[in-house]
Image (cartoon, rainbow, N blue to C red):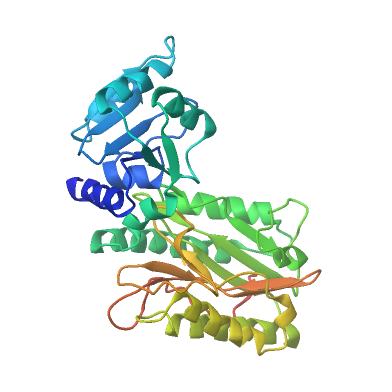
Amino acid sequence: MEDRIKKIYEIIDSSNLDAIALVPGSNFRYVTGGNFHLMERPTVLIITRNKEVVAILPSLEVDSFNKLGINAKIISWHDKDGFQKAFVEAQNIIGKIDTLGVEGQRIRFFETQAIKESFEAIKLINAHKEISSIRLNKDEKEIQCLKKAIEISEKSLEQTIQYIKTGMSEIEIKNFLIQALYKNGGEGLSFDPIVLTGANSALPHGHSSEKNIIKKGDTLLFDFGATYEGFNADITRTFFIIEADEYQREAYHNVLDANKVGIKNSKIPKTMHDVDNETTLVLENGKFKEFIVHKTGHGLGLDVHEDPYIVRGNTASLEKGMIITVEPGLYIPGKFGIRIEDDVVITDNDPQILTSFSKELRIINNE
């Protein structure tokens, strides 16, 4: 973990900060190895330019933190006393600091308020992007964890497909999938699985319903993933129930072509803009241009959505060890939606596709 804390020191230097504060979440877990909850009790790790590490912890988390072997000064507080004195004590240890980088998308108002009340005239800087950059380039162990999460997910999807019959509801299918993910070794869910059929699948982030019943001619879209050692699989596949008409097939193959082009372009020295542009052009040059509603993809790791974001205008270059999703989609209101998503590792050569579940048009027709 010392190597990872060193990455924080580098961010402090490059961003001209006096210190960085982390709260429970992916960056906290990456730096410490500890998976703590973001709850009503503030848990804050402050790392300073002077190489001081101070952990403000609720008393019930001290033993768990000690097991991590982090060389930090621990300030614990008890529910009956409140947490403000712990922040004052942290200030006494650290001394005066002018600028503190925080995770703007993670830290909450009452935590920033506690910091401001304890550190006189401190300026809080949103350094979320800079802090999260320490996780951009995955090592082999991290890639293997994600591969395991994907393996569990794909096995569970195939079992779910074998289970499906017309007349089932989205919720019924979703619940079976969730059970399969856990039975096959998933430690958790990357997010609440999306299982959508028919017109409901035209909502990119729609919600499953007991009222939506699969029937002949429907699309059936799955967007889901298992977690393994904190790493999140993120897979989308779209199927057809009993039959698919020519309009559906044409839309499906348009998305599939875009997916393949996106993966082909996911290589150094391309930029995020290049990948999204080439992928989206395939859809824009088809017959369904008006039904494009989102970018091509995003980074994947300890967070389901993290840097880098695969979108036009992002001129950052792909780098070795990045893991991204390539997930073009088309959404035709009142009719159906189609999305195909793969998880891809950027290498020195061709992209490594971690997802292996077939993308060829598949019709579910179980007896």
Which image quadrant: the C terminus?
bottom right
Q: Nearer the viewer, residue 174 or 265?
A: 265
- Whether residue 184 appears in this view of the structure is no
Horizontal arrangement in the rendering, residue 186 relative to residue 140 (left or right): right
Instruction: Tell me where residue 43 appears, x and y as whole percent.
Output: 39, 30
Q: What residue is drawn where x is 40% and y is 38%?
A: 24
Q: What residue is drawn where x is 32% and y is 55%?
A: 134
Instruction: Tell me where residue 23 appears, x and y as whole percent.
Output: 40, 37
Horizontal arrangement in the rendering, residue 218 relative to residue 364 (left or right): right
State which quadrant residue 35 falls in. Answer: top left
Q: Nearer the viewer, residue 73 or 183?
A: 73
Instruction: Tell me where residue 101 appears, x and y as whole percent.
Output: 39, 43
* Count of numbered badges drawn on the protein: 0
| As drawn, 102 above or below 218 | above
| As drawn, 12 above or below 318 | above
Instruction: Tell me where residue 220 appears, x and y as whole percent.
Output: 66, 68
